[in-house]
Amino acid sequence: MIWIILFFIIILVSAVLAFRSMKDYEEFPDSVGLNSLFYIGNPSAFSEGLLDRLHGVFSEKKQFFSLEKLNKGSEAALAIFGPAEMEDLFPELKLVEIEDYLGEAGSELLAVSKAVTVNQSLTWLIDPKSSFKNPEHDLKIEIKENQKLFLQAVCVPEINAKTGFQCTLRLMAVDPNPVDRLGLAKKAAEIFEQSFGLKKLVDSYPEQKKFSSYQQRSLIPKEVSPFQLNTKDLAELFLIS
């Protein structure tokens, strides 16, 4: 009898802890329908100080945003997904609204489409148990001209920390050749673990699910786990050298 009582106590405690860990996320409404994707025309203005301002604005609005670093061959760019008024709130970024660079399966067959689809990509989550570390030198991943590598951080300002964000991190490797795509994904996962301490999360999610989660740029309950980065960490992670 005592074992049954202990079992239910453990279940109750686990439920309470899970509720408390998700409480902050529930305070932020799902406002994805009101958001836009912007190209950051002035990436040099993206700094630790600007992230401090983002923290303040999004804490007040009780919203989240997505930062995205887009590498294609030797080129790199930054994008941000958030409310349309960001263009006025952060003029120094020179934001330009753009179409989504991700598309539906089959659109890659259209000559006019440059959108990346699930048939060309491999996507994975960063393990929230990772311990972030600053790289000892500038990180530069050499990829082929027809390859792409995307880094995404869905960021929720921590209410009790002026410079802290709860983050869900994802990486996407893109190559039309499945063998080269797998090689790129493996190389990227190794580099991010060695340089930043960010480990690939081993999961059983189908590739379509992981691609869709990236494309939604939202808070997906089953994929949200406690993982904090401060403004300095995020600035380092999304640096364009």
Image (tube, grey):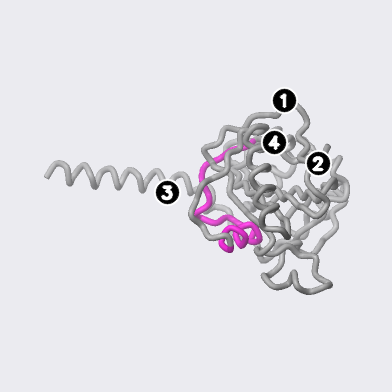
Percent x, y of residue 176: 73, 60
Tag 2: Cα neighbours inside 10 Å, few (<14), some, or many (≥20)?
some
CA distance separating discs 1 and 2 = 21 Å
The region drawn magenta spans 208-229
Sequence-first tag of 2 and 3: 3
Tag 3: Cα neighbours inside 10 Å, few (<14), some, or many (≥20)?
few
| Residue 136: image tag | 1
Q: Per the image, is 34 magenta?
A: no
CA distance separating discs 1 and 4 = 18 Å
Identify the residue at image location x=40%, y=43%: 17
Residue 124 relative to residue 44: left or right: left
| Residue 231: image tag | 4
In which quadrant of the rendered image does the C terminus lie? top right
Please give the residue where the numbered disc 3 appears in the rendered image.
19
Residue 222 relative to residue 131: left or right: left
Q: Nearer the viewer, residue 71 or 98?
A: 71
Percent x, y of residue 75: 85, 47
Percent x, y of residue 132: 61, 33
Which amino acid, mark 2? Phe
Q: How many marks?
A: 4
Identify the residue at image location x=57%, y=43%: 200
Sequence-first tag of 3 and 1: 3
Please give the residue where the numbered disc 2 appears in the rendered image.
46
Sequence-first tag of 1 and 2: 2
CA distance separating discs 2 and 3 = 34 Å
Q: Quadrant of residue 188?
A: top right
